[in-house]
Image: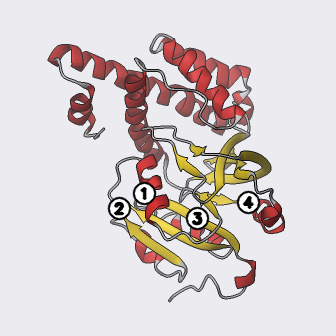
Amino acid sequence: MEINANSNQKNMNLPITVIVLTKNEELHIKRFLDKIAFVVEQVFIIDSYSNDETLAIARKYKKIKIFQQKFENYATQFNWALKNCPIKTEWVLRLDADEYLENKLVKYLKNNLLKINQDVNGIYFRRKVIFRNQWIRFGGFYPTWLLRLFRYQKAVCETRHMDEHIKILDGTTMRVKKDIVDYNLNSLSFWTQKHDWYATREAVDYLLNIKKPEQTRYGGSQQDQKRRWLKNRLYNRAPLFLRVYCYYFYRYLILLGFLDGLVGLQFHFLQCFWYRFLVDSKIYEIKKYQEKHRVGIIKVVKILYNYQI
């Protein structure tokens, strides 16, 4: 059965194209499309050859356009979509399959998007992380401001292996105090496996940039720039492993992560300690392999983690 996303409120569709990257997202894709396909003009799925029911579910929605593209990294995939998808709207919205817009944000966009000044080319929203059915409010995780909505051809995704942001090419940005919800429904095992993959990318970014520190001013928000500056100038220059303890102490105690309770303890420990310790362990492993075998980072990462730089 085909679901017609234009069935009732065609005139109410926002002049927005949503781009979502997918790979085996059968657990999230129906929720994602149910919440977004009925309120925007276009939805493009850039799929990395899913082998589950992701595409079968997506094809039930009349409005959805599916493209398949081999995955290299998030930035390359997203920028490919900006260049190759037939985008016809003024605005583009970047979302992940496990994210959705809160109703208050949808209402705000319907009432205000067409009134936004022409010099504003990017809009920041707050990210609300839900972990094991609980909103993570403390530890510096809320509000996290993310630039997700931008005028077509006025922004690109910066090229990084990890922690990439949307970069506005010209014009100004604004903040909207409404939330995008990040609510992954997968198991804890999936979460740790995904973050193991993230840790490889984070280690690669660190090793590639350690000799040539990147520019911290890249057109992002003040929060983006502050966090990037702190990471480049303080965290990345601190001793491996020791910095992880300091970071966890800062997040969990100074920024009150403990107020998130038992679920918060799990989240902050895994996100702020376990994950960061894993990143440093991979950095250490790569360096030791290089010292022993006298080979470059590209070859080492391919051998150890089957990750292509």
Q: Is residue 232 above or below residue 49?
A: above
Q: Earlier in the sequence, mark 3 or mark 1?
A: 3
Residue contact between numbered discs 1 and 4, judged by CB atoms under 8 Å: no
Q: Earlier in the sequence, mark 4 or mark 2?
A: 2
Location of mark 1 (residue): 80
Q: CA distance from mark 3 to mark 1?
A: 14 Å
Q: Is residue 33 above or below residue 155?
A: below
Q: CA distance from mark 3 to mark 4?
A: 15 Å
Q: Which of label 4 and label 2 is nearer to you? A: 2
Location of mark 2 (residue): 69
Q: Which of label 1 and label 4 is nearer to you? A: 1
Instruction: Please tell me which residue is depicted at 42% across the width and 57% down the height of the picture.
Output: 80
Q: CA distance from mark 4 to mark 2?
A: 29 Å
Residue contact between numbered discs 3 and 4, judged by CB atoms under 8 Å: no
Location of mark 3 (residue): 18
The answer to whether residue 136 of the structure is visible from this angle is no
Spot occupied by residue 125 in the image (x, y as percentages of width and height): 72, 49
